[in-house]
Image (cartoon, grey):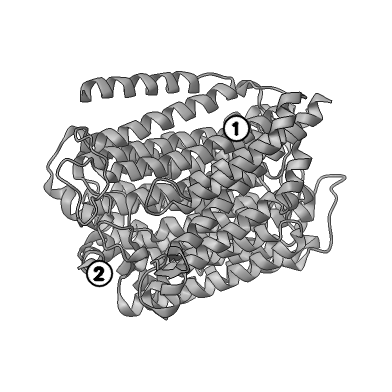
Amino acid sequence: MSTDLLVILPIILPLTMAGFCAVFWLRPGWQRWITVTGMTLMAAAAFALLAGVLSQGVMVSQPGNWAAPFGIAIVADPLSALAVAAASLVALAASVYAFRGVSENALHGGFFPLFCGLMVGVNGAFLTGDIFNLYVWFEVLLVCAIGLLVVHRDGVNLDAAVKYAALNLFGTTMFLTAVAFLYGAAGTLNFADLARVVPELGASAGLTFALVLFLLSLGVKAAAFPLFFWLPIAYHTTPPVVSALFGALLTKVGIYAAFRIFMLLFEGTTGLVGEIVVWMAAITMITGAIAALVQTDLRRMLAFLIVSGMGYLMMGLALSTPEGLGAASFYLIHDIIVKGAVFLLAGVIAVAAGSSDLTKIGGLIRTHPVLAVIFLGAGLSLAGLPPFSGFWAKVLVADAAFDGARPVLGGIALGTGLVSLLCVVKIWMEAFWKTGPEGMRVTARLPLVMMVPATALVLVSLAIGLYADPLMDMAARAGAGLADPSAYIEAVMGAGE
Amino acid sequence: MTLLYALSVAAIMAAGVYLMMDRNIIRIVLGTALIATGVNLVIFLAGRLGPTAPAIIETGAYTLGEDAANPLPQALVLTAIVIGFALLALAAIVAYEATRALGTVNADEMIAAREEGNPFEPASREGSSARK
Amino acid sequence: MQSVILNALARLFFVAMLIFSVFILLRGHDSPGGGFIGGLAAAAAYTVITLAFGAAKAERWLILHPVVLMGVGLFCAILSGLPPLIGDFGGFLYHLWWEGQIGFLQLKLGTTLLFDLGVYFVVVGGVLSILFRMYETGAEEAN
């Protein structure tokens, strides 16, 4: 397959499927099959792209044959190819889960076209090589995300949608302002061209203002410490399939954009900005885990654990070393898969026990031993215990912190790992081990379409944990590519010459 | 000229932020629209003010004339306007549906999700679950 | 809201605006105009019908459901970008042109026209799906 086709497929496949779903608007039953087919094809395309990037290096396509830096380049480097592959796995699992987990209202309100549209936005944001285009993809996925909240048309989700929309629209607008200031200072919008131009500009008020706005807006998107308040308010009420998609993908797109922008444009986080990011990372990590510990609702605990995970990812950015960035790339992949798995499993538990409030459920190990084992696996991966992917992710991040002369950060990372282990143990003891309260309604038979995708994601995490070398190599390459963007720049700018 | 332009952007932004502070979600929607407009003007300003000739290549020529305006900010603003239009429509729908479902335009009274327990006040949960 | 003047003139406006929207669409590539603006003009034409005779009638005149129209438009837009990918001579959306003469007509056609047509349909469908939805729920509440 040609490079042009390979790079663009993860974006146009879900877009085509969104079109298909829209054409069959009056037949919601067909939309399910269209979406599952589309996500399968997308996963295949994503892995083909990953294989291509690993063998050929950075792959670039110039839509419309407009050469960089004048046109928009679509770029797949190891990091973006990995992220697209992990995201498409979660999307595939969620699309299978959606056979049962979607209400009638949502089905007729356009759940599946929006699902496909969300994946267009996510893959577009991962693959774009142009900062204004990144803003456009942010808006695409934001519109689809708000749509996925609104289609349920019940009070809880609409309330969540209002808050989610207001804060994220404001965040995206700040991002656009930052892009405007960056353009005013540098005169270009292509990432590779910016990476050449910006370091030579020297300090200026416009550039500093852009930097601060990027930090704030991506902090909102990535749910970093002082800006994460929208997340636990919006995520716990959504149906499991939606929260799995949101939890696995939306915040990760934010942190991915932060990696790109800070590493390419500002040569890592140095000086005062570096200090700020370090402390944002540390506080995000620890507050997320501690806040999760005091919750009694399963899904809200998981929402706070997303926040905690974002701290680990920011740590890689704060370190700005190849090892730190490689570790963060590994963590990114692990986090996408395992957050998808735990939110889907939380949905299964809610079906099995009739509630996700841990005070109202219990004793599931007697009725659903298989579910107990699978959730234990997902939880251990989340907490960072072997033999799951989470172990390697946390070890790599902490190790990079000690190597990068940030022992305090490494210590906080390890401590946070303990607190998240406590969270997982608490969830497991409450939901499965303790005797269930009186009058709990247990659903004995769990639908296979719900169990299978969640189990598959846990198995992926287990496989990565047992056989970590390939992903570690890829993550190291992704980290090296972030720390030294010369290959990226050459691939993009060279393709235009 | 640039200063005047910057001041007017500041005024629009200030009005937008003021509206966003309001509790009435209709005003929040309007504020977001105003801020988006302000940002469009910032993009335009970032491309430098000056030449007034339209950015159209003359017949027979292959490049823009010397006195032509910078076409890139125009393209960016056009894109941003289209996206802003879509977002405004969506925000209006969300506000409308939320008002219908929750019976209020006051963001402080939209507490359906918080009734499921406020994540920042664990103690209030017992009361709210008893109400349900 | 019933107005004799609006009802009498709505059909006339509708036809005129729809023709004008197609004109804007076709002059799009080299002159100001194109799919987005044309689509908005066409959506305005249907809005006139909605205001005069209600959303049900406008939906009938649209023939396709607005969301279906969006899907069709999306297809047109994607299709217009595929030839270079299949033939492997450029990136997505690299447009091909054909110039020629049929009788008196001097024609300049390109795959951009298909793209613009797609945008046109998406905009008409998108605007009208929002309009019809709000108009219907608004009418429910008024009763």
Asked if the residue at tag 1 contacts the one at tag 2, i.e. Cβ–Cβ closer than 8 Å, the answer is: no
Q: Residue at x 65, y 28 (%)?
A: B123
**Residue A490 placement, left or right of C83:** left
Figure quadrant of the C terminus of chain A: bottom left
The disc at residue B92 is: 1
Residue A186 horizontal/vertical position (percent): 20, 45
- On the image, which quarter does residue A273 sit in? top left
- For mark 2, does the 10 Å Cα neighbourhood hold few (<14), some (14 to 19), or many (20 or more) residues? some
Residue A495's disc number: 2
Q: Nearer the viewer, residue A184 or C138?
A: C138
Q: Chain of mark 1?
A: B
Q: Is residue A238 above or below residue A373?
A: above
Q: Nearer the viewer, residue A437 or A59?
A: A59
Identity, as a three-letter code, of the amino acid under mark 1: Ala
Q: In the image, what residue occupies the spot 47% across and 38% down?
A: B84
Name the image quarter holding the N terminus of chain A.
Answer: bottom left
